Image (cartoon, rainbow, N blue to C red):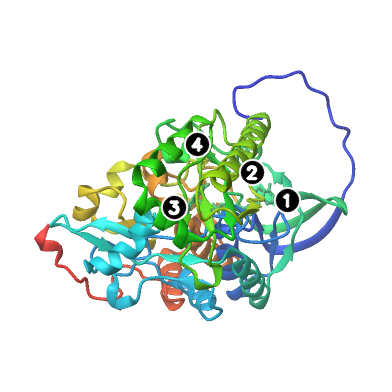
Amino acid sequence: MEKGQSFKTITEPAKKIRIFREADVIVVGGGPGGVGAAIAAARAGADTVLIERYGHLGGMATGGLVNIIPNLGDIYGKQHIFGLCQELIDRLDARQAASYPEKKDWGTTDRKIVERYLDANLRHFYVRLDPKGKEIVLYTALVDPEVMKDELNTMVTEAGAKVLLHSWGTAPVMDGNTVKGVIFESKSGRQAILGKVIIDSTGDGDLLPQVGAEYISKIDPALRISHLCFCFWIVNVDIEKVDEFKLSHPQKHEELMQELTSLSGFPFYFKTLLKTQEGVIWFHPHLECSSQTDVEEMTRVDITSRKRALITWEFLKKYVPGFGKSFMMLTAPQLGTTGGRRIVGEYMLTEEDMNRDEPFEDTVVVFADNDRGELSLKHPEMYIPYRSLVPLKIDGLLVACRAFSSDESVNNVFNLIPHCLCFGQAAGTAAALAIDSDVSVRNVDYGALRNSLIKQGVNLPGVKTVDKPTLSREKV
Ligand SMILES: Cc1cc2nc3c(=O)[nH]c(=O)nc-3n(C[C@H](O)[C@H](O)[C@H](O)COP(=O)(O)OP(=O)(O)OC[C@H]3O[C@@H](n4cnc5c(N)ncnc54)[C@H](O)[C@@H]3O)c2cc1C
């Protein structure tokens, strides 16, 4: 139930439930934020349990069919995101499950390379304008979500964390303002896990209303993060034939796409660049909605979008050469959620911070800022303080997912897969450190936290990174 709503109620009878386990760190939600947190906490020696409601890890990045890890480097070709995120990409790469521009091409204006990404409709993820207005290529990776599910299982369990799949974290265990554990539901019934630090990585900040934390859920409907999405794959497409048709009959193709739109179909799709996914195209339609956490609204969007996805496939198969033998392979098991609740933390990141070029004393990660046009050229780096993961007033809790403490303009740019993996890595490391040094997560020593992250390969201010910018920032 959201703040300010009132309903008729019943009182649940109090009952004793089994304590399934005690742990140091409990992570609720196994998306990019949650896996980052669980791996980091477990590697740092904390006894860690990860609870995930579905049968796989990865959240939107796998079950949501959102399989692009963008903004790893900035417009100047400089890599910013290293650490666990880069490790994951390397591990996927070793399994032919990742595709990205060669390092020498980060920041290139070479038309052949730029065109490769434009042709796949992947401009938004791979191509930006440099200070001279020329199109350049970014360091972004595209990954295979099925291999990623398996690789994440391996990484989390290798780190020593206990994973509980098919388990919904439903309620916190509270002692005053301190979170002491989580109640979860599964086919084994309702059980509790008690822990020293609880990390909310549900993406939506599911624990926030229940622990009594201050949070924000209002989002401007004009922003990307106000949408629900319904992603799906059509496979066995003869892409060459589709391209030939588009080239030889541009007007006919355009008319068909207009007709598809008028039938409520989705005309925009991405072509995969993975060699192992020939003939696959993906759709990521964004859908306006009144709430991303209201069950009735989610149901409405799911039902109507499924119909629209089938309308799309049937139309393409019937009218567009190349789709004749295609079939609808998969609709995302998880409805795409882009925003949700956001914690009010010890530090709330605002639009002003995006134009700030000074690191914080508790900076735990530096992101590439690529999505704000001219402003990104002037401010290609964004500093994230640890305090944006620490809720006000509530103890024993960290937030490591897209629910980090940020206004909607910051969240709209920095809540993507690589960002959430980094929040997770910082939160998991901080949780283990707090337990080790017997302090609350609020009072973690920033220096010790940063040193530990640096040792893990995270790029932090004051540490030399591997790549020199290909262009000078002075030219802006
Ligand atoms: C259509 C679409 C396209 C996008 N495109 C991209 C893109 O190309 N690249 C990119 O980087 N980002 C993209 N994003 C954004 C990105 O996917 C998310 O912002 C990112 O995945 C957020 O990570 P997270 O860990 O915060 O949350 P999520 O990925 O949502 O993961 C949350 C996890 O917690 C689990 N969970 C939730 N509630 C509970 C509970 N109560 N108990 C137990 N488990 C729970 C969920 O099942 C899930 O596994 C896109 C999003 C959408 C919807």
Q: Nearer the viewer, residue 291 or 458?
A: 291
Disc 2 and disc 1 in contact, CB within 8 angstroms:
yes
* Residue at image point 51% right, 43% down: 285
* Point 67% across, 50% down: residue: 333
Classify the position of the N terminus by image quarter: top right
Q: Earlier in the sequence, mark 2 or mark 1?
A: 1
Q: Are marks 3 and 1 in contact (CB under 8 Å)?
A: no
Label 2 CB-ligand 1 distance < 8 A: yes
Disc 3 to disc 1, C-alpha distance: 23 Å
* Label 1: how many Cα within 10 Å (few below 14, some 14–19, many 20+): many
Residue where numbered disc 4 is placed: 260
Disc 3: which residue: 387
CA distance for labels 4 and 2: 41 Å
Q: Which residue is mark 2?
A: 207
x and y percent of residue 376 in the render? 24, 52
- The three-letter amino acid code for the residue at tag 1 is Val
Q: Mark 4–mark 2 contact, CB under 8 Å?
A: no
**For marks 4 and 3 on the same chain, the one whose residue lies earlier in the sequence:** 4
Instruction: Please tell me whether mark 3 sits on a helix, a strand or a loop.
Output: helix
Total labels drawn: 4
Q: Quadrant of the C terminus?
A: bottom left
Q: In the figure, 148 relative to 7: above or below?
A: below
What is the spatial separation of the Cα atoms under label 4 and label 3, in whole angstroms? 47 Å
- Per the rendering, the mark at residue 182 is 1
Closer to the eye: label 4 or 2: 4
Classify mark 3 as within 8 Å of ligand 1 or not, answering yes or no. Answer: no
Give the residue type at disc 3: Arg
Q: Nearer the viewer, mark 4 or mark 1?
A: 4
As shown in the figure, which amino acid type bears the numbered disc 4? Leu
Q: CA distance from mark 4 to mark 1?
A: 47 Å
Residue 115 makes an appearance in the image: yes
